[in-house]
Amino acid sequence: MSPRDTAAAPLAKTASVLRTGAWADYALVDSGDGKKLERYGRFTVVRPEPQCLWRPRLPAAVWEKADAVFDPSDEEDAGRWRFDHGRPPESWTLGWGEAKWSARFTAFRHLAFFPEQAANWAWLDQSVRAAPEPPRILNLFGYTGVASLVCAAAGASVTHVDASKKAIGWARENAGLSGLEQKPVRWICEDARRYVQREVRRGSKYEGIILDPPKYGRGPDGEIWRLHEDLPEMIRLCAELLSDKAQFLLLNAYAARISGLSLAHLTAETLTGRGGIVDWGELALAEDGENGREIGLSFFARWSRGPQT
C-alpha cells in the first residue's frame, strides 16, 4: 500500500448534534425535573431522564394526565410502569416512513424502540437509496428491527441479527405490520459476535453494517458482551465484512463512559485505507414547539464513502 492507502479515514472536523423532532407518531412534549413527557401515537408517557436538570414548562396538570408513568427502582433501567387512568393496550402501531412497528411497555423503561434513532433512520434511508446497486446490509444487535425495515423499504437486502428470540419475533411481526414481509430480510437469532466471526470465516461481504451494541448483554448460550472490552474486536471483524463497494458503517452506543469522538477514532483507524469520511457526534431529542430544549441520548460515528447531509 502507498502511504495514502494506509491513512485512516478522515474525521469530520466538528461534532454533529443530530436532532429528532416531532413526527406524526412521536413527540417530546415537555421535559424537566429529571423526566420527559412524550407522545407515542395517541398515548402520553412519562419516563425518567436524569439529564433534564431544568424545570418543566407545562403545568403539572398536563403531566398528571399521562397514560403511563415509569417509576424507576434503584437498579439501572429497572422499575415498573404505572397506569393511573386505565391501562392502555399491550401494544399499538406506530410508524416512520414505510416502517411500522408495535410500541410496547417493556421492563426496561422504553417502548421497544428508541425515537432519537430517527436521525439515523433518515441517514440509512438516504444511504441505501443513493447506492449504485441494492446493497447488502448487516444489522447487528438489531432488536425490534426498525432500522432493518427502513433499509429493506429503501431497497436493501438485510441480515438482521439479535440474541433474543423475543426481539426477533417482534421484528418479524413488525415486518408484517409494515407490509415488508416479502422483502429480502434474514432474521438470525444468535450472538452477534459469534455470527460475525463465522461470516468472516465464510468470506461473506456487505455494503453496509449497522452496529448498535448494548453496554452489557448475554447471548443465547450465555455469551457475555461488554461494550468497552469487546467493541474494538467487533468493529475490526466488521471491517473485514465490508465489500470493496461498501457504502457505510454506522456505530451507535448508549454508555456514559464513551463519546462520539472515541467511537469516531476507533472507526477511522479500523477502516484504514478505505477513504471516505467519518462523521460523529450525538443523537438528541428536541422538544416540540418554538425554542424547544434538547436531550442528548446516544453517541454515534458513521463512516461513508463521502460526505452526506
Image (cartoon, rainbow, N blue to C red):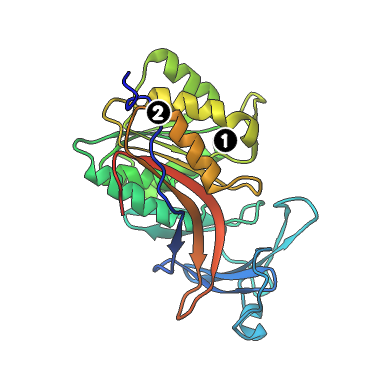
Q: Position of residue 113 (x, y in %)?
A: 51, 52
Q: Position of residue 55 (x, y in %)?
A: 66, 78
Say if residue 117 shows up in the picture.
yes
**215 or 299: nearer the eye?**
299
**291 or 7: nearer the eye?**
7
**Which mark is drawn over residue 164?**
1
Asked if 172 appears above or below 107 in the picture, the reply is above
Residue furthest to the right in view is: 74
Q: Which three-letter amino acid code belongs to the residue tagged 2? A: Thr
SS at mark 1 in the image: loop
Residue at the image point whose x is 52% and y is 41% from the top:
263
**Which mark is drawn over residue 90?**
none
Left or right? Give the position of 208 relative to 26: left
Q: Circles 2 and 1: CB distance less than 8 Å?
A: no
Q: Quadrant of residue 156?
A: top left
> How many marks do you count on the picture?
2
Residue at the image point whose x is 33% and y is 44% from the top:
151
SS at mark 2 in the image: loop
Residue furthest to the front in view is: 3
Say if residue 112 shows up in the picture.
no
Query: How far apart are the two marked residues, 2 and 1, measured between alpha carbons?
Result: 33 Å
Say few, some or many: other residues with alpha carbon within 10 Å of mark 1 (under 14 / 14 to 19 / 20 or more): many
User: Disc 2 designates what residue?
Assistant: 272
Residue at the image point whose x is 73% and y is 50% from the top:
76
Left or right? Give the position of 273 relative to 39: left
Asked if 85 appears above or below 11 in the picture, the reply is below
Q: Quadrant of residue 224?
A: top right
Q: Position of residue 46 (x, y in %)?
A: 63, 69
Q: Which three-letter amino acid code belongs to the residue tagged 1? A: Ser
Question: Which label sits in the foreground, 2 or 1?
Answer: 2
